[in-house]
Image: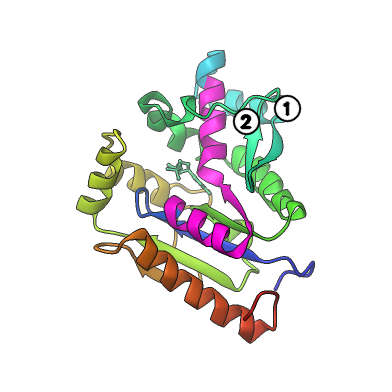
Amino acid sequence: MDSTDKVVIAVDGTSGSGKSTNSRLVASSLGFNYVDTGAMYRTLAWYCLDRGIDVNDEDAVSSTVSTWGAQLAERDHALRLEVDGYFPEKEIRTAATSAVVSAVASYPAVRQWMKDIQRKCLSFGSMVMEGRDIGSNIFPETPIKFYMDASLDEREQRRAAEGVIEDLAERDRRDSQRKANPLVVSDGAALINTSGLTPDQSSAMMLEYIKKKLSEQGGPDAS
Ligand code: DC
């Protein structure tokens, strides 16, 4: 349990494995905030594209995070980054943003900035936070961690159903092989393979595990 007694549920895993859908369902069922850290990296990638900042120029992107003034905002129990009060909801899901987000996310100065802001999310209350390094790097101390995966075929079909055709294997490769905080199965993470499962089924498995962990810790909502 975190020293503030707020609960952090860390959800990491591959692209298209169902992290977002399941994290939202779990957060809503527990009355926790939901935090999509991928959206934060996407917001930075969009910002660079929008302002003509070269995403392959590490120095330029690194200095951007110290000046861009993005701030945390809570909307309907979800936390996100806003730039001058604006959340680029549609822009961060375009093929152009998806193609460059891994590059932006590979820079150590960017990751440190994101770590600082992601840890601040806890001041808004207990949360389900999803990403690639939440259990290994952002909140390594939390006892409740998941690693989600599914077959490449199924992950590509899910993305296609959302209207997105993307080389997920390539993005997984970049996310897993980068030097700074790569995607790994963190110590103590419960593995959830969502292949062939509906979101109701996988989120129910997660909730059962969370309730068991919370009751072991004597934490809130352990019933
Ligand atoms: O979850 P997503 O596909 O929206 O994430 C977009 C990219 O951001 C992904 O390719 C890797 C990166 N990312 C990361 O490096 N660390 C995180 N905690 C979350 C996302």
Residue type marked 2: Ser
Q: Nearer the viewer, mark 2 or mark 1?
A: 1
Helix, strand or loop under label 2: helix
Expressed as whole percent of the image width and height from the top left, the position of residue 162 reads: 31, 38
Q: Does residue 123 sit above or below 73 in this rendering?
A: below
Q: Which mark is residue 62?
A: 2
- Rate crowding at label 2 as few (under 14), some (14 to 19) or many (20 or more) other CA atoms within 10 Å: some
- Rate crowding at label 1 as few (under 14), some (14 to 19) or many (20 or more) other CA atoms within 10 Å: few
33 horizontally vs 120: left or right: left
48 horizontally vs 152: left or right: right
Q: Does residue 78 sit above or below 104 in this rendering?
A: below
**Image: magenta residue range:** 20-48
Q: Quadrant of the N terminus?
A: bottom right
Q: Which residue is mark 1?
A: 69
Colour scheme in use = rainbow
Residue at x 70% of width, y 39% of height? 72
